[in-house]
Amino acid sequence: MYTERLSLKPNEYEKSIARASELLRNGGVVAVPTETVYGLAASAYCEDAVKKVFKAKGRPQDNPLIVHIADMDMLFEIAEDIPENALICAEKFWPGPFTMVLKRTDIIPSGVSAGLDTVAVRMPSDPVCRDIIRKSGIPLAAPSANLSGKPSPTEPSHVLCDLDGKIDAVVISGSCDVGVESTVVSFTGGTPSLLRPGGVTLEQLREILPDITVDSAVLSEPEKGAKVASPGMKYKHYAPKADTYLVEADGEKYAEFVNGRNNGVAICFTEDSDTVKVKKIVYGSRQNEATLAHSVFDALREADALGAETVYVHAPSKTGVGLAVYNRLIRAAAFRVIKL
Ligand code: TXA
Ligand code: MG
């Protein structure tokens, strides 16, 4: 299959949005930008289109998709019995990197929610994404537009690297602002529960949901065969080809450790750049977690491009959006953490 490149240059913008929407309305799959990561979109109302998404990504069938909406009318079409605190969160965090798991209506085919009676819903803020949802007039089911298990795509080149020839089109926009996927909160079990940390931080959530709990899968490896609240959290994920380790250490100990392993590649902070002497990829400043979130997936992909065999990532703090970065890295590292 030829994958169309849809350009957003000013004189092509309207045409490309119209083409993406037409493909989506007709059951096609199109990679679209969002403020978090690129998503692989399909009509959330079309079971066959959704099947193509799972096939293109090689995604396990038991891992449900997030449905992207442009307005509150779409929310009420796909979810019901929405608790008051969820509506307050919607008001506060939408449009933005925030996903709510709610009770679903029958309009959502079971393939979207992998047979669960819930649906994950998000209203993205990216203007291109919003234009595509509005123009197509339907909610879009979209997981991240990467091959299952690979680092999530934050640039069109990442999408093409994984999915060229497997999907109908890619909308060529810039690099994603946030860089890690949305925060996922479940509102279906009484007390709200954080299933996946993301661009909206736990600190921000606690201001509105003081009793929010953090699912154990956020920072630790689910037991083999255990039932997990967010199926996506049980897989090895976001991983480069290289053997990856997460290293928790201060700057001095980290540098000493990686410098002693001369065939490894360091994914480190700007603050480490003078002291780390092995091959390195800088992913942002230790002091500014947003910069780390923005570049973490690109850094993991770059490690592959360098042909790295072993990668040692300097672990971020678990505060602010750092918690989301830590959550992705611990999976990229298959839970191998070195504490110095
Ligand atoms: O930022 C994002 O959320 C991106 C962009 C494209 O919007 N999307 C994304 O989708 O990250 P995906 O499929 O890579 O991750 C969806 C996560 C998975 O961990 C999945 O298990 C969880 O959301 N999820 C989806 N539906 C769920 C449900 N009904 N109950 C519990 N978890 C659910
Ligand atoms: Mg994903």
Image (cartoon, rainbow, N blue to C red):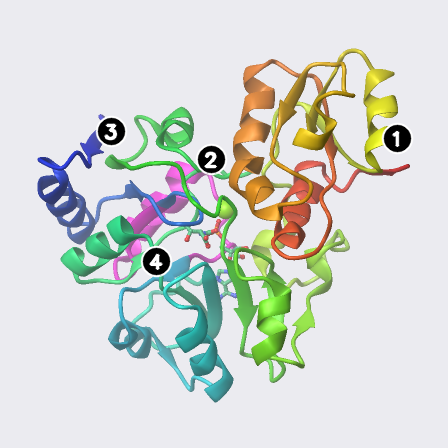
For the point 28% across and 51% down, which residue is it? 129
In whole angstroms, how far apart are the C-alphas of marks 3 and 4?
A: 25 Å
What number of labels is visible?
4
Viewport quadrant of the C terminus: top right
Q: Is residue 47 above or below residue 285?
A: below
Q: Name the amino acid type tagged 3.
A: Thr
Label at residue 125:
4
Task: Pick whichever of labels 4 and 1 is earlier in the sequence.
Answer: 4
- Residue density around tag 2, few if under 14, some if 14–19, many if 20 or more, within 10 Å: many
Q: Regarding mark 2 in the picture, which secondary structure is present there?
A: loop
Task: Pick whichever of labels 2 and 4 is earlier in the sequence.
Answer: 4
**Which tag is nearer the camera, tag 2 or tag 4?**
4
**Which tag is nearer the camera, tag 1 or tag 2?**
1
Viewport quadrant of the N terminus: top left
Q: Name the amino acid type tagged 2.
A: Leu
Task: Pick whichever of labels 1 and 2 is earlier in the sequence.
Answer: 2
Which segment is the magenta one?
Answer: 40-65
Q: Is residue 90 magenta?
A: no
Q: Is residue 230 above or below residue 291?
A: below
In whole angstroms, how far apart are the C-alphas of marks 1 and 2?
A: 35 Å
Q: Is residue 47 magenta?
A: yes
**Which tag is nearer the camera, tag 4 or tag 1?**
1
Label at residue 94:
none
Quadrant of residue 293 within the rendered picture:
top right
Residue holding disc 1: 253
Quadrant of residue 12 within the rendered picture:
top left
The answer to whether 154 appears left or right of 309 in the picture is left
Residue holding disc 2: 147
Q: Is residue 150 something one can see in this rendering?
A: no
Task: Pick whichever of labels 1 and 3 is earlier in the sequence.
Answer: 3
Q: Is residue 319 above or below residue 7?
A: below
